[in-house]
Amino acid sequence: MPRRIADHSATLPHHTWETQASRARLVLERADSEREPDARFALEVSALHLARAIPDYWYTVGELVAQESQLAGPESRELSSRLLGDMEAIFSSARHYKLIDSLRRWDFHWEPLRDPASFHIDDVVRRGAPMKLTTGPNPNSVAGVAGFEPFFSGSGRRLGRANYYEIRHGAFVDEAAKLALPLGRAIHEFLEDLPSCQAAVLAIPEIKSYFEHPTRRPLPDPFSNFGPPAT
């Protein structure tokens, strides 16, 4: 059979994210038309991973920009950290970013996500991953949990990221927006906000300069389809 090769000829970055966003929307459309609850939720979780991969693509672009900056090691790492922080702040402004990020990391690392539709409308379900706390090196420091919230003093802190989600009224709770909403709606609204986020990322001076460089070759498109058979 003829061998298929990856097609990296797409112009970036203007269309790359839209390819992935279109796939996420297509999966959501299939989920909306699915009558079987388990199948519908499985499709929504698939769309969740597709949508959340878009910010990760840009975080990787930031690392590449730092690597090719010709700065010394410490300065390159500082640039990479700054670009990541700036881009995370931009994508965090998209509706439901924190919820989608939490659910995606939970589904990848812990037990399968619970389908909110499988619970009674009056049920409240909270799922929290094991949490590791430390008092740190300073004396008289404290790290603990009261109810569902950790508290710290002195050098006390949480080790690693938090993994947690809550289901209320048959939907996932978005703590930032202070509402419970269906997963499909959360992903739709997140995708709607991505164009403005990408525009803000491309306005970051180092990112803008990188893509405007006259001899810059396009980055490989991680979301492209395989191209035609090689001849």
Image: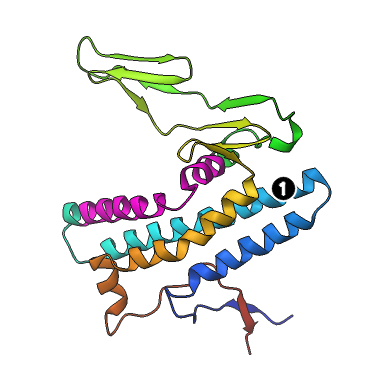
Q: Is residue 29 left or right of residue 99?
A: right
| 83 drawn magenta | yes
Of residues 118 and 1, the one drawn nearer to the viewer in this rendering: 118
How packed mark 1 is, by other alpha carbons closer than 10 Å (few <14, some 14-19, many 20 or more), is some
Residue 113: percent from the left, percent from the top? 65, 37
The residue that mark 1 highlights is 42
Question: Of helix, strand and loop, which mostly describes the magenta segment?
Answer: helix
Amino acid beneath label 1:
Ala
What's the residue at 43%, 76% (across, down)?
12
What's the residue at 37%, 67% (across, down)?
199
Q: Quadrant of residue 154?
A: top left
What's the residue at 83%, 47% (across, down)?
36
- Which element type, helix, strand or loop, lies under badge 1? helix
Q: How many marks?
A: 1
| 96 drawn magenta | yes
What's the residue at 60%, 37% (across, down)?
172
Residue 59: percent from the left, percent from the top? 38, 57
Report the magenta residues as a range.
76-105
Residue 48: percent from the left, percent from the top? 59, 51
> The C terminus appears in which quarter of the rendering?
bottom right
Q: Is residue 163 left or right of residue 126?
A: left
- In this picture, is 117 found above or below 145? below
Residue 183: percent from the left, percent from the top? 63, 46
List the single residue furthest toward the bottom: 231
- In this picture, is 98 found above or below 46? above
